[in-house]
Amino acid sequence: MSLTDAGLRDIAKWCPQLQSLNIERCGRSVTDAGLAAIAKGCKQLEELNINRCYLITNVGLVALAQGCHQLITLISDRGRRLLE
Protein backbone atom coordinates (compact mmCIF):
# COMPACT_ATOMS: atom_id res chain seq x y z
CA MET A 1 0.00 0.00 0.00
CA SER A 2 1.36 3.44 -0.83
CA LEU A 3 0.37 7.01 -0.17
CA THR A 4 -1.88 8.65 -2.78
CA ASP A 5 -3.33 12.07 -3.50
CA ALA A 6 -6.43 11.03 -1.55
CA GLY A 7 -4.26 10.25 1.46
CA LEU A 8 -2.59 13.66 1.22
CA ARG A 9 -6.02 15.31 1.06
CA ASP A 10 -6.95 13.51 4.28
CA ILE A 11 -3.69 14.56 5.94
CA ALA A 12 -4.32 18.17 4.88
CA LYS A 13 -7.87 18.04 6.24
CA TRP A 14 -7.11 16.40 9.59
CA CYS A 15 -3.60 17.70 10.34
CA PRO A 16 -3.63 21.46 9.72
CA GLN A 17 -0.83 22.02 12.26
CA LEU A 18 1.51 19.55 10.55
CA GLN A 19 5.09 20.85 10.48
CA SER A 20 7.05 18.01 8.87
CA LEU A 21 6.07 15.53 6.18
CA ASN A 22 8.10 12.78 4.55
CA ILE A 23 6.52 11.29 1.44
CA GLU A 24 9.80 9.93 0.08
CA ARG A 25 9.45 7.06 -2.40
CA CYS A 26 5.84 7.84 -3.26
CA GLY A 27 6.82 7.04 -6.84
CA ARG A 28 3.93 7.68 -9.19
CA SER A 29 1.14 7.59 -6.62
CA VAL A 30 1.33 11.27 -5.60
CA THR A 31 0.86 14.14 -8.05
CA ASP A 32 0.73 17.92 -8.02
CA ALA A 33 -2.88 17.65 -6.85
CA GLY A 34 -1.82 15.95 -3.63
CA LEU A 35 0.88 18.51 -3.03
CA ALA A 36 -1.62 21.32 -3.68
CA ALA A 37 -3.92 19.83 -1.04
CA ILE A 38 -1.06 19.88 1.47
CA ALA A 39 -0.25 23.47 0.51
CA LYS A 40 -3.85 24.50 1.07
CA GLY A 41 -4.43 22.63 4.33
CA CYS A 42 -1.06 22.54 6.10
CA LYS A 43 -0.03 26.18 6.33
CA GLN A 44 2.43 25.48 9.17
CA LEU A 45 4.53 23.01 7.15
CA GLU A 46 8.24 23.66 7.69
CA GLU A 47 9.86 20.57 6.19
CA LEU A 48 8.92 18.34 3.25
CA ASN A 49 10.73 15.40 1.68
CA ILE A 50 9.62 14.58 -1.87
CA ASN A 51 12.53 12.35 -2.93
CA ARG A 52 11.48 9.80 -5.55
CA CYS A 53 8.06 11.38 -6.09
CA TYR A 54 8.20 11.34 -9.86
CA LEU A 55 4.89 13.03 -10.74
CA ILE A 56 5.48 16.21 -8.74
CA THR A 57 6.34 19.08 -11.07
CA ASN A 58 6.83 22.83 -10.87
CA VAL A 59 3.03 23.18 -10.67
CA GLY A 60 3.02 21.41 -7.30
CA LEU A 61 6.03 23.36 -6.08
CA VAL A 62 4.37 26.68 -6.96
CA ALA A 63 1.29 25.65 -4.99
CA LEU A 64 3.56 24.73 -2.09
CA ALA A 65 5.37 28.08 -2.24
CA GLN A 66 2.09 29.97 -2.34
CA GLY A 67 0.48 28.04 0.50
CA CYS A 68 3.29 27.11 2.87
CA HIS A 69 5.05 30.32 3.82
CA GLN A 70 6.73 28.63 6.81
CA LEU A 71 8.53 26.06 4.62
CA ILE A 72 12.23 26.05 5.46
CA THR A 73 13.43 22.70 4.11
CA LEU A 74 12.46 20.98 0.88
CA ILE A 75 14.26 17.71 0.22
CA SER A 76 14.16 16.58 -3.39
CA ASP A 77 16.38 14.40 -5.54
CA ARG A 78 14.91 15.90 -8.71
CA GLY A 79 17.18 18.94 -8.61
CA ARG A 80 17.47 20.80 -11.88
CA ARG A 81 14.70 18.82 -13.59
CA LEU A 82 12.13 20.55 -11.37
CA LEU A 83 13.38 23.97 -12.43
CA GLU A 84 13.14 23.39 -16.18
Image: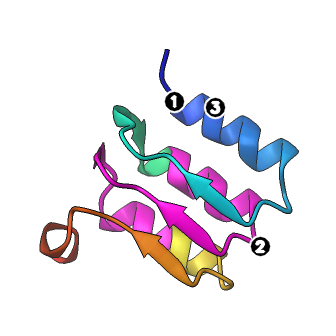
At a point 14% along the width and 75% down the height, the residue shown is: 80
State the residue in front, 62 or 15.
15
Residue 57 coordinates in the image, percent (x, y): 30, 59
Asked if 30 appears above or below 71 in the picture, the reply is above
> The disc labelled 3 sits on which kind of residue?
Gly
Q: Does the magenta stretch include residue 55?
A: yes
Instruction: Say which mark, if any, is on residue 21.
Output: none
Counting residues from the N terminus, which is met first, the one under dot 2 or under dot 1? Answer: 1
Residue 79 coordinates in the image, percent (x, y): 19, 72
Mark 3 sits on what residue? 7
At a point 40% along the width and 55% down the height, the residue shown is: 50
At a point 86% along the width and 43% down the height, the residue shown is: 14
Asked if disc 2 and disc 3 are in contact, CB closer than 8 Å, the reply is no
Q: How far apart are marks 2 and 3 (CA)?
A: 18 Å
Instruction: Say which mark, if any, is on residue 4.
Output: 1
Mark 2 sits on what residue? 44
Q: What stretch is highlighted in magenta?
A: 34-63
Asked if 35 appears above or below 26 in the picture, the reply is below
Q: In the image, is 27 to the left or to the right of 42?
A: left
Q: In the image, is 62 to the left or to the right of 19?
A: left
Q: In which quarter of the image is residue 16?
A: bottom right
Secondary element at image label 3: helix
Q: How crowded is mark 2: few (under 14 residues within 10 Å), some or many (20 or more)?
A: some
Asked if disc 3 and disc 1 are in contact, CB closer than 8 Å, the reply is yes
Q: How crowded is mark 1: few (under 14 residues within 10 Å), some or many (20 or more)?
A: some
> The disc labelled 2 sits on which kind of residue?
Gln
Residue 77 coordinates in the image, percent (x, y): 24, 62
